[in-house]
Every structure is written in structure tokens, then in C-alpha cells.
Amino acid sequence: MTIPAAAQATVPPQFSVTFPASLHKQPLQGRLYLMLSKNGKTQPRFQISDNIQTGEIFATQCNAWRPGQAVIVGDHALGYPIENLRNIPAGHYFAQALFNVYTSFHRADGITVKLPMDEGEGQQWNRKPGNLYSMPKRVFLHSENGGEIHLELSRVIPPLPALRSTRYLKYFRIKSPRLSRFWGRPMYLGGMVMLPSGWYSHPAAHYPLIIYQGHFQRYFGVPIPMSRQAPSSNLKGFARIRADYCYRFYQQWKSGQLPHVLILIIQSANPYYDDSYSVNSANLGPYGSAFVKELIPYVEHHFRGIDQGWARALYGYSTGGWEALASQIFYPDEFNGAWVSCPDPVDFHAFMAVNLYRDANAFWRLGQFSRVPRPAARRTDGTVLTTMAREMLRERVLGSKGRSSRQFDAWQAVFGPMAKDGYPAEIWNPRTGRIHRRVVRYWRDHYDLCHYLKKHWATLGPKLKGKIHVTVGTMDTFYLNNAVQRLQKFLSGTRNPHFNGIFEYGPGQPHGWWGGGPNMTAAMSALTAPEREIPEIVRHMLATAPKGADTKSWRYK
């Protein structure tokens, strides 16, 4: 008797993954990823992204995974962008497995959490030293009779090479007592300081400090790097233009054409994200206090900073833009201005395309009989690049309990309260998008910067007058201009005192617009940012310096 094809049970494909004792003798805890790609141009682990050309990734959580023990990645594993392995079309693929190793943190509050510790790479799971991975394997997946495919984790990502200071660029790493107490183990802050020309030949000089904030950086860039070499004649187009500006930046710095200041770039990657946002957080710990009371004093002591609030300023974009504004607001006496570009949401009425206070769902606009997906990113012509639901699916695959080390989980960790299990409380249901009101109220009271300013303007206003400078493109890729406009509306109406700051908009410009006038593109605004903003910051410092302040020792020829 022949059984009709429709009645035959389909067997989805599955992968079994092992690792040898020669690679790691002790049991492992963490997250196992299985990745598929259709091309072999790069390893599958480097093809996972939020764009439409992303590779496929599945994941499963592992605890006490022993050498030689097979872990099955099959029908139970959640995937992105296709959610189930059985729905992958039949065909040839390149398959690769990677294990993201977790560390147990026995925190001071008595709670133990298991998280992916940063190893100096800036929370990049596909490049993190110590993670195990297999080499890509060409496989054929059957849609009906899947079978089992074996992959062995045969390699470990090696440690990163040590960063070496040069005569003028100094790397540092310090143990933070505050963060170490919170996490129950040694925790560190790091960064790099660019010294001004003449620093060695003027030992009596003390310098203003400009702090560049943002995502983790191993190398110097504010946002562009300095290049010691003239551009190659082989470079063409924008690559040549960029090289010209990087070389020009170096020449301006070396010659003293730019003001003599210290530039500090912070490295504060942590178990949840590549950056701490430089605030005190229920889930990340006292990064704000560590930044102000440990890191800055260390830098100013070792590199001859002026060590006074009037001589410190902040600037950055995106995450760093929010960070710069938040640092200025929460520590108004410690800093003398924030130059903020395209910041993360500064008003949660406009949390990208979501109104956290009025919307019921973060993934969908809901009607009587239908729903429309909320966008998460766009081109400047309005084309939607990805959606909120799709972004959250990727984060759910990369890590449960807010452990994806990606943007939405990072906000949840920084802004949110702690749940009973010790992990960040969810701002919305990660599967359905339903917004949790109790958590929203906590976010509002602690990290909605516009709400905080409204509530405390009577005391903050006199300390922030003239210190807030914000730029953003009107077609910001992540809809961040909407929150900036709400912030401007409030600040423009302030009295006693008026905020006396600046808001500048780039017509039709995407994420990464740094100002420079209405005709400046985002790319050119970034290239010209140092030569525009560093002198502007210093002019503001000199105009607001208190009587008797050191405004001369560092202004040599």
C-alpha cells in the first residue's frame, strides 16, 4: 500500500553540536547559535544583521554542557528571520555553530545572574574572545526528510592583541571599586586620551577635558580618526574625501591649529551592552558615579586636566548623544555643555515610532479589525528597512532574559527596574509587543530626559543655561528626530531661565547628522565635526570660565 504524500509525517532537519575536551575541559553555560547562509563570501557568523540580506540564525540555551555531549538544534529552536528550522527551504547552505560563553555573577544583592561578559571586543558575540565555533560546512537541507547534521566546535576565538599607547594617544584601564562591589567581581573602566600638541614641552600647563561618548571603540575616532599619512593617490570618490579629512584632522591637531585640550573616549562595555550610558542603573550598576567620581578624576590627575566643571564638556552621537545629554542633566555642575547629535530617545512619547505612554503595543498600530506593523528603521525616502517585531525577534534569538547585547535589550537593562529573577524587567512582551505600564512608569521617572527636565527645571535650569546643543536630521533613520522636536518644544518655552541653547536640523538627513548647516550632508557633517565642534566647545568654556580660572596655561603658541 502506498501512503499519500500528504499523509506522510515530515521530519524537520536538525543539527547536533558537540565540542571536544581538548578545546574546553569544563562544562559550559551560555547560548548556542546555529547559522545558515547561502553564500560563502564570509563565515555565516558575520552575516547576521537587521537588514534584508541577513543570514539565518537559530539558538538554544545551554547549562552545564559537557565535552562530547551532543546538543540538538532542531524544531524547538527559535530562529531569525525564519522562526522554525522546518520552514527553511530545501537546498544547499553553509552551516556554522558558535557558542557564546556566559559568566556567573554573584552580585552584592545576593542574586546570581548568568551573562555574556565582554572580553574587550565590545559585546560582539561573533568576535568575542573565548567563544567556541565550528568552521563553515556545506550542507543540504531536506524539506521533508530532514535527517541530522553534525557540527563540532573545533576552534576558540583568540584573545585580542593588547592596545599599545603612543606618544600622544594613551590607553588606560582602571578597576572600579563601585562597579566591582555591585557585580561581586573585579570590574573595569577603560578608555583612551589624546594629548594635545605641546603637552610634553609645557609641563606646567593644565588642560580642559572634552569627553567623547558613544558605542565601544578600540581605536580613536571622534567620530573620525586621525591619519598620520597623506591619502594615497589610488583612493577615489568618498574614500579619498574621508582620507583627506582624517589627515587634515591630524595636521590641525599636531600643529596646534585646534585648541590644546584633552580628548577622552570612554570604554564601558558591560555584561549587557557595549556601552553603559554613563548612568546609575538598577541592572548595570553605578556607572554614572563611577564615571564622574573614578574615571574622570583618574584622567585629570594623570594627564593634567584642570579638574573643574567649567573646563569639561561632552559630545557624541546616537547612544553617545543621549549619554552626553544625560550626563549633563544628571551631573549639571560637573560639565559645562553637551554637544548632542541624533540622540537615542530623549522623550518617551516618541520612543522611535512608539509612544510608550499612549500606545498599547510596541510592534503594531492597532485598529478595530486590523493592525499595521510599526517601523524600526527607514531610508530618507521613507522606505521601511525593518520593523519593531522583526528587531525583537532577532534579539530574542540572540539572548533570552534581555541578554542579546543588542539595542532594545540594552535600553531595557539601562532604563528598567530589576525583575524578581534578577534580570531586567520587560518593557513589553517580547513575543506580542504588549507594553507593560508599571515598567513604563519606572522608565519615565528615571530616564525620560524631557520629563526629568520638566519636573526639575526650577533647580536644573540655572545650571543648564547655555549648555544644551542638539543636532539631528529630519529623516533620522530610527525616527529619533521626533523626540528631539518634543524636547525643543519644552526647552524653547522655558522661563526663569530660558534654556538659551541650540537646536539644529538637517533637512532630509538620516541618522548621524552632526550639524554644519542645512546644506551639509550627514557624511560631510561627520567628517567636519571635530574641526567645528572642538573650537566651539572651547569658545563656550572661555566665555563662561569663572573669575581666576586657568584660561592661559594651555593656550600657548
Image: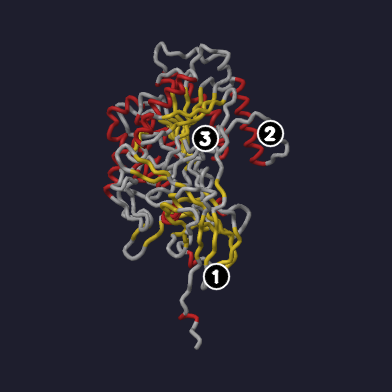
**How many marks overall?**
3
Dot label at residue 231: 2
Instruction: Give how far across and how far down residue 157 sits, in percent.
Output: 55, 45
Residue 201 marker: none
Q: How far apart in space, not on screen, are marks 3 and 2 (Cα)?
A: 27 Å
Q: Which residue is mark 1?
A: 142
Q: Quadrant of the C terminus?
A: top right
Position of 436 with respect to 394 (left or right) is left
**What residue does disc 3 label?**
517
Q: At label 1, which amino acid type do we have?
A: His
Tell me how far mark 2 sits from mark 1, CA to CA.
51 Å
Q: Mark 2 and mark 3 in contact (Cβ < 8 Å)?
A: no
Q: Are marks 2 and 1 in contact (CB under 8 Å)?
A: no
Tell me which amino acid carries mark 3. Answer: Gly
Of residue 514 and residue 330, the one placed in the foreground of this image is 330
Q: Helix, strand or loop at disc 2?
A: loop
Tell me where residue 458 appears, x and y as whole percent. Answer: 27, 29
- Depth order, front residue of 101/401: 101
Horizontal side, residue 201 vs residue 206: left or right? right
Whole-Å distance between the Cαs marked 1 and 3?
56 Å
Above or below residue 79? Residue 537 is: above
Residue 511 vertical placement versus 60 (above, below): above
Q: Quadrant of residue 95?
A: bottom right
Seen from the viewer's position, the closer of residues 433 and 112 is 112
Give the amino acid type for the residue marked by disc 2 in the picture: Pro
Foreground residue, 74 or 430?
74
- Can residue 79 be seen from the camera position used here? yes
